[in-house]
Image: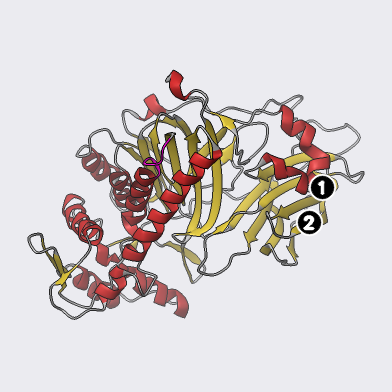
Amino acid sequence: MKLHPGILAGCLLFILCSGTNNPSIKNNRIYVNDYENVLGTSLQIKVSAASAAEAAVAENNALNEIDRLDHILSGYNRQSEFSRWMHSSAKPTVVSPELFEVLNLFDQWKTRSNGALDASAEVIGKLWKDAAKRNQLPTEAEISQSVAVIKQAHYKLDAVNHTAQRLDNAPLMLNSFAKSYIINKAVNAALTAGGISGVVLNIGGDIVIRGEHTEQVQISDPKADAENDAPISDVSLSNKAIATSGNYRRGELIGGKWYSHIVDPRTGLPAQNVISSTVIAPNATDAGALATAFSVLTPAESAKLAATVPGSEYLIITRDGQRIESKGWKILEIPVAKPRVTNPNIAPAKDKTWDTNYELAINLELAEIEGMRVHRPFVAVWVVDKDKKPVRNIALWYNKPRWLSDMHAWYSAYYDTFMDANSNISSTSSATRSPGKYTLKWDGKDDKGNLVARGSYTIEIEVAREHGTHQLYEQEMDFSGKPKLITLTPNTEVASASLDYRKKTRDAQ
């Protein structure tokens, strides 16, 4: 989730609902909540409702549905229905309607994508994960053997008796679009609550927008995907789903080279040519399936497959930087707001300005309780000068304005500016991140968009949890053109944090 110029990355609980022409719901407000460790990533839910109580009912409906479906479809929970079926004997087993539907969808998409989508791609994924542990590439024989396994039939469905029968022991995983499937069901559950006019659910960058609501969605740049980096595209959506697949956040490092976690079941090789694929579709499962398939298909194959899904649009970014859009993408795209700059790139004449070849990466991993869904704490990140005067507000994450005063240091530095700022919040579609792991960047500019002078500044990181602890980092750092990495001490709310002053990189991966 990203915020337009004003306050970056804020989570405002009370926002007047815009994007609707229905007079009966114009008094509805948007209620926002953020969670970590949901389906192995982060979750944000926005509910347009007349009251906080109605929004809470809708949110609980969605969360309960996510838990229910995760207990059916998860490949990581050994007690899930899918995991138990995977380890069952090779005989027809009656399965739930949801598991049957998802297995059937995989069969359909395997055919439609000419093998680019396959539940047994986990055979290849496991091969490359094991290779990474040895730091040695898999052999051609190992790859060929794995591809041969994938080509076999792994299960048989009986629609009459509603059974699924395992035919071999090949590992299967439903990740390709199970997340999108769950999001869609969860949104439908939320909308059953009374007084709800719209819901936006974002889990790990896959988003569903339903009801009387229009959402601005930013598409992360695969070559610059920090939380406050400029998006590669910005679209306006209503009653749509959007999913992004990419190789820039997860994968394996073997022999010093990065290999995508997305593999081509037809060749046994990690996806290489496409580094990001974003799909908009009326149906969430279609969006998730297409986005994953486009990561391994050629652009021509992707266009042909997209033509089979009415109402779908896409944006593909290749390794060499080529941007490939569907014909209707521009209709949905909106101009990206640019920050107002006064005297750009100018600092006091007596000082040398920030070296624009460098940037500061602020890496932050929030603490989590293993196996539990938790609210994301309030987080603020900003920069002050040697006189402790605010220089740049980098990020503010929160959901209840009344508790912002608990962020004592940030509150005293920026609250007046915050109250006057434009609080237009958008969602972000991106490749899935691990739960609680975030990266922010400082480009050396102040709040007015001017480059600061070289020298020492203090990075402030404040974290406060409702009914929890309050933590504050204050780390002075020199920004004079010499790379430096500082690792911060973990605390109750932060599992790890580091400040990496480095040369800018835009590798194609």
| The disc label shown at residue 441, or none | none
Q: Residue at x 28, y 75 (%)?
A: 84
Q: On the rendered structure, is 393 left or right of 301?
A: right
Q: Is residue 219 visible?
A: no
Front-most of residues 499 and 34: 34
**Secondary element at tag 2:** strand
- Residue that numbered label 2 is attached to: 472
**Secondary element at tag 1:** helix
Q: Amino acid at mark 1?
A: Ala
Front-most of residues 447 and 203: 203
Q: Residue at x 42, y 49 (%)?
A: 62
**Residue 79 position (above or below residue 362):** below
Q: On the rendered structure, is 369 left or right of 73?
A: right
Q: Quadrant of the N terminus?
A: top right
- Residue that numbered label 1 is attached to: 409
**Quarter residue 95 falls in:** bottom left
Place of residue 144 in the rendered image (x, y in percent of width and height, measured from the top left): 24, 72
Q: Residue furthest left?
A: 160
Does the stretch in magenta take in 193? yes
Span highlighted in magenta in the image: 190-194
Q: Amino acid at mark 2?
A: Leu
Front-most of residues 462 and 230: 462
Magenta span: predominant SS is: loop
